[in-house]
Image (tube, rainbow, N blue to C red):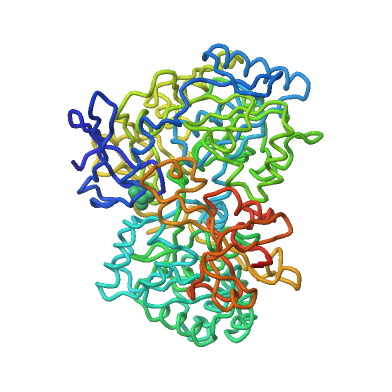
Amino acid sequence: MTRETRSGGPTATHCPYCSLQCGMVLTPGRGGRTLTVAAREDHPVSEGGLCRKGWTAAGLHGHRERLTTPLVRDRATGDLRAVDWDEALDLVAERLRAVQAAHGPDGVAVFGGGGLTNEKAYQLGKLARVALGTSQVDYNGRWCMSSAASASNRAFGIDRGLPFPLADVEHADVVVLVGSNLVETMPPAARHLDRCRANGGTVVVIDPRRTATAERADVHLQPVPGTDLPLALGVLHAVDAAGGVDAAYVAERTVGWEDSRASASAWWPERVERVSGVPADEVRALASLLAGAGSAVVLTARGAEQHAQGTATVLAWIDVALALGLPGRPHSGYGCLTGQGNGQGGREHGQKADQLPGYRMIDDPAARDHVAAVWGVDAASLPGPGRSAYELLDALGTPGGPRAMLVHGSNIVVSAPNAAHVTDRLAALDLLVVCDLVMSETAALADVVLPVTQWSEESGTTTNLEGRVLLRQRAVAPPAGVRSDLEVMAGLAERLGAPGTWSTDPAEVFDELGRASAGGRADYAGISHARIAESDGGVFWPCPDADHPGTPRLFADAFAHPDGRARFVAVDHLGPAEPVDEAFPVHLTTGRVLAQYQSGAQTRRVRELPDTGPYVEMHPMLADRIGAYDGEPVVVTTRRGELKAPARLTTAIRPDTVFVPFHWVGANRLTSDALDPASRMPAFKVCAAAVRA
Ligand code: SF4
């Protein structure tokens, strides 16, 4: 079943979780009470592969914790009570109007998610700008790959996570993964690395932990967390010193090389060794490997990006790729491995504080005119840019900050940095409305909880990490009492007297999204649900019209800047936002585990997936120093909070670093809210901590 079509009872669709968007077939049984998952054998993305999260994705079908009726908090008792949909939506609309009457349009905030389909992300941005007139809209994708996005926009003039199909890496001579644990986060994608090695290629992993991905690589560099930037500068320095710069490419296809060269000249490998802990010989060896390769791919992920210097770190690795002449060449280039299921599409169509659909900027007058015409409103009525995700949450309930918030597709209490503080801000709101499938930690705090459909019960598109637009198709009817997010938004828009049309049909909303994106950087105008359904594995954007074949590979002839050239951007290493010191002497880093996904609101409820709770991974030398034992509790403390969890001893981590998975309440009570100045990405991946037995 290669096409995105239904075949009788079974429905061809995609996994609800990560950005690989593996193809799967859902088959309802026993009158719709059961739902069986099968892999789509010849889907080009996953080739019959699924990880254990995908295989068990139907675990929430018919789950006893599924929400099936709207709930409203009783002001007298403080308890949530069941109400019907009209009462819930009437109440939400009335209270939103009251907040805006007292505090202005920006008194209401909207918070979305990188797991929402393109249709929902688009409609959420429109709801904020047209129905509510608020600038206060952002989403949790800001915490995912926004540093890579801002770096790609600066360097290439466009941000598409991978500007080539992932399978291209199989034919590269060298693949460098910076801060990616692909083998555990998206296991079916690891076959591309294995095939690269089988073809004679070399896989290099840069990670403070010897992860499962590092175990499968040829070379593992193990820097101190937060030092991928000086490491990149050292590699660039060594490439230049060895005469490895592709001078013809640099002259013909780029601008800015001399500034980046000057910046890298200050980072000779021995200096890099002192800062990053990576031996100078290993820095030189990587530079020599890259300079001698006929083709090479550099890929970054959250380990490199979730820092207060995240954008600069990605820019430094892009500078390495440009100096080697990689972007736009066959089986070569730079790419970002996006995390969330629709992390790519979710950042293109308007739920981000500074953007309108099609990756247009909200402060661009021409962009405002175009989108306002599609929405049937006056461009002057659209608000300007709002606060980024963390800044928005930090402002909740403060003087001049939002007093009410709608949340779709995000479990902020678990996933926000400095989470205890964010939870306090949520509690300060006059009104918190959460749409979710289950009573997540954030929904449990809400004044109104609205039960919405999950992936198998609705249709919609996602854009995977390759920029491939895919169609998820409805396989089963939702439980009685459950509505789609599009229905919730239409119901609110109607009650708020919003102008324009508010379809609840995902195919119609997608067509409108296509018109709104037309002519933008992420142009979907030539894509439709029907076209994806007839395709062999989706359609790559940009795709400006129905006759256009889509664009699997970017940059072969030109970059997206007006002069067609890529930009070197000179950066320097400023050090971590929160250096270790006597009181907090170890580095804390966080990440994912194979069996859980993001905040765990879904996967922690799937019976077949192990729910271990948080743990603290540490080196035996560190454990010895503090008197900790494997499996026994330790306490991790940062300037923001503390977490008690069992120790897991492993030599796979640096002795100066501890790792805590972030799928449970706790890890993000420790993490730092220092923000990258360009992307506003929080420094999730490193802060200073103390550990005691
Ligand atoms: Fe594939 Fe990711 Fe789903 Fe696993 S979680 S099955 S890798 S899409």
Q: How far across and how far down the image is residue 543, in percent?
A: 37, 41
Judged left or right of residue 326, residue 496 is right
Q: Nearer the viewer, residue 273 or 65?
A: 65
| Residue 355 appearing in the image | yes
Q: Nearer the viewer, residue 135 or 611?
A: 611
Quadrant including the C terminus = bottom right
Q: Check the image and report above or below for 303 versus 238.
A: above
Residue 469 spot, x, y in % from top left = 36, 41
Q: Is residue 579 above or below residue 683?
A: below
Q: Is residue 126 above or below residue 250?
A: above
- The residue lying at 53 percent from left, 29 percent from top is 435
Q: Residue at x 49, y 40 (%)?
A: 520
Residue drawn at x 71%, y 29% as measured from the top left: 106
Instruction: Pinpoint residue 463: horizontal percent, then vertical percent.
Output: 40, 43
The image quadrant of residue 509 is top left
Q: In front here: 632 or 115?
A: 632
> How far from the left and from the top, in percent, is residue 40?
23, 45
In the rendered structure, the answer to whether residue 212 lies left or right of residue 433 reads: left
Residue 251 seen from this side: no
Q: Quadrant of residue 373?
A: top right
Rendered image quadrant of residue 17: top left
The residue most toward the right is 399
